[in-house]
Amino acid sequence: METKEMIHTINDCMEKLDYITVRKYIIDNIHHLNLYKHLLDDATLNVLQYLNTTIDSEPQPVSRQEVAIIYSINMYSKMFDVRSLRMKIKENPSLLMRQDIRHYFNEESKTLLEGMRVISNHANKV
């Protein structure tokens, strides 16, 4: 895939909140994307920077602010408030890229987030 096409695909997936695909593309092409990061959207650039810093490091403990975000995602999912849920997801992409937060979500959140392709079905998937 050409660089411009790949960057367009990543930016498009980010806009659609397809974080599974975004994470996969960024991890597979992280060195190449670091060279062309000026072509990425702001949200995608933030995710790239987050993955650059965390890809080889130990997972950090969940902060109080992140717990509040997860709580609100769980509440929006429980009330099936998809509009507010999408807004909260769009505001916090780097939190939802973390592999270690899946167990903090309730069953409603897991179902909705998996259906929206924000989190993967299995914890060991990329």
Image: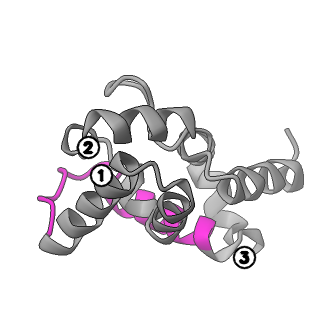
* Residue for point 83% across, 56% down: 8
Q: Are marks 2 and 1 in contact (CB under 8 Å)?
A: yes
- Say which mark, if any, is on residue 38: 3
Q: Residues within 10 Å of mark 1 (few under 14, many from 20)?
A: many
Please tell me which residue lies in front, 126 or 111: 111
Helix, strand or loop under label 1: helix
Q: Position of residue 111 (x, y in %)?
A: 42, 32
Q: Which residues are magenta?
A: 43-63
Q: Nearer the viewer, mark 2 or mark 1?
A: 1
Task: Give the residue type that dot 2 points to.
Answer: Phe
N-term-proximal mark, 3 vs 1: 3
Residue under pointer 1:
74
User: Would residue 17 appear left or right of 113 to someone viewing this image?
Assistant: right
Helix, strand or loop under label 3: helix
Task: Give the residue type that dot 1 points to.
Answer: Asn
- Say which mark, if any, is on residue 105: 2
* Residue for point 60% across, 47% down: 22
